Amino acid sequence: MALKLYNYYSRKIEEFKPIGNVVGLYTCGPTVYDNVHIGNWRTFVFEDVLKRVLTFNGYELKHVMNLTDIDDKIIKKAHNLKVNYREITNKYADAFFEDLKKLNIIPANAYPRATETKYMKQMISMISILLKSGFAYSGDDGIYFSVEKFTTYGKLSGLDKKNLKKGARVNDDEYDKENWTDFALWKFKRESEPSWEAPFGEGRPGWHIECSAMSTLELGDTFDIHTGGVDLLFPHHENEIAQSEAATGKKFVHYWMEGEHLQVDSAKMAKRDGNVYTLVDIAQKGFEPLAMRYLFLTAHYRSKLNFTWESLASAKNALNNIRQNLSFYKEKDFSQDRIVSSFRNAIDDDLNMPRAVAVFHEALKSGVSKVELLKMDEVLGLELADTQEQKLPTGAQKLLDQREAARAAGNFGKSDELREVLMKMGVEVEDTTDGPKWKVKNDTSY
């Protein structure tokens, strides 16, 4: 089965056909003005799974994730705190990279920042081209992209300009998603704001042009895959297409992939409702980040996922059960082809991770080779290779064998006595339909 991905541009599942030998992947990264919340982390884990599936299929790739380090929110926070904006962006960029490790997300090949000189030059160059070609014009407070000039505007998001209200020029980075508007490519210098020299006037870039400049400079005018959260579909990704294709005259991206929203207790996350959580909040409740990663894997990336503390607790238990089973895993001698094929078919079917997780549990129960299990985890990313094999204390195996013999003979009193002896040795035994399972307790003082 070939790898198939849902392309938001065509609204179809398509066979993935890369442009060249190296897959170009651009993912919209965080705006580094605060700690990243779990909704964003769901998107970043989906993108990590996509990378892992591409690698599993033998593709080499170059992954670029931008860090937005200049925009309205950053400037406002710096002004309120009376600090240089770089103090804020550096602090939260460092926190972002620490959290990436906690969720076992493979680092990108490049993390460009909008304020780096080469990317600022690329933005200025693109804006100059757009001005010269008539796709952009100068207003009293900045340079704007003329949406009306780009005839296919709305194709990605499925919006019909005829059915939407025409808005005025909009200088804010985020705006009313019911309107289509001419958006700011460049904002002329304002008092006490950072600014850069440009032939069309000193100022700073608008949010949308940043991604176009960074992606094309790193990956070329046309590349394979662009991803982000579904909330970026309009206007951000729509605007990226318009300004990029107007500037280069080439198709910008072949495959657009968007991750769905994470809800909290069936409601939209909002600071005013107090339901916006970060990994710090998760840790304070006693949960490890990998439990959150497992929870993300239980829903398809194009489906909404409802977060509750109960669902996270279930994910934690499931992950711990996997680790426990692996710690004293016994392989069985049987053909593994069907299960291995089922796993590949699941991940190649538009990253069907809920199905892949179910196949993994089946594989674990069936006793496939540990090598195959760890290959599957190269996609799941649960760090199972680090699971330590548990070893029984001296004499415990003999007691386990005696207990099984007593159970087989119906001598359950003797079986219970042996269970108590094993408990004192630090070995906990659980009788299941698949036979007894044991684990070594860390605390053997009882």
Image (cartoon, rainbow, N blue to C red):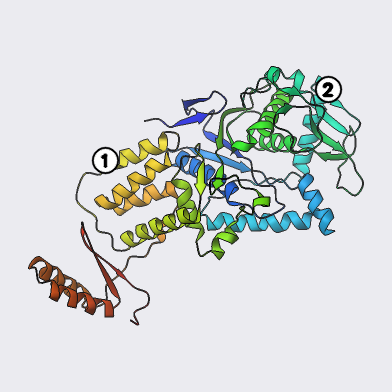
Residue 395 appears in the rendering: yes
Answer above or below: position of 212 versus 39.
above
In the rendered image, which residue does mark 2 sit on? 132
123 up-or-down from 81: above or below = above
Mark 1 closeness class: few <14, some 14–19, many ≥20 residues within 10 Å: few
The residue lying at 38 percent from left, 37 percent from top is 346
Q: Which residue is mark 1?
A: 337
Residue 91, compared with residue 40, is above or below; it is below
- The kind of secondary structure element at disc 2 is helix
Q: Are marks 1 and 2 in contact (CB under 8 Å)?
A: no
Q: CA distance from mark 1 to mark 2?
A: 59 Å
> Who comes first in sequence, dot 1 or dot 2?
2
Q: Residue at x 48, y 44 (%)?
A: 49
Question: How many marks are shown on the rendered structure?
Answer: 2
Q: Position of residue 123 (x, y in %)?
A: 77, 35
Q: In the shown orientation, is residue 112 left or right of residue 419? A: right
Badge number at residue 78:
none
* Residue 383 in view in this figure: no
In the displayed image of the protein, which residue is found farthest to the left? 409
Left-right relation of 360 to 164 = left
Between 240 and 196, the one nearer to me in the picture:
240
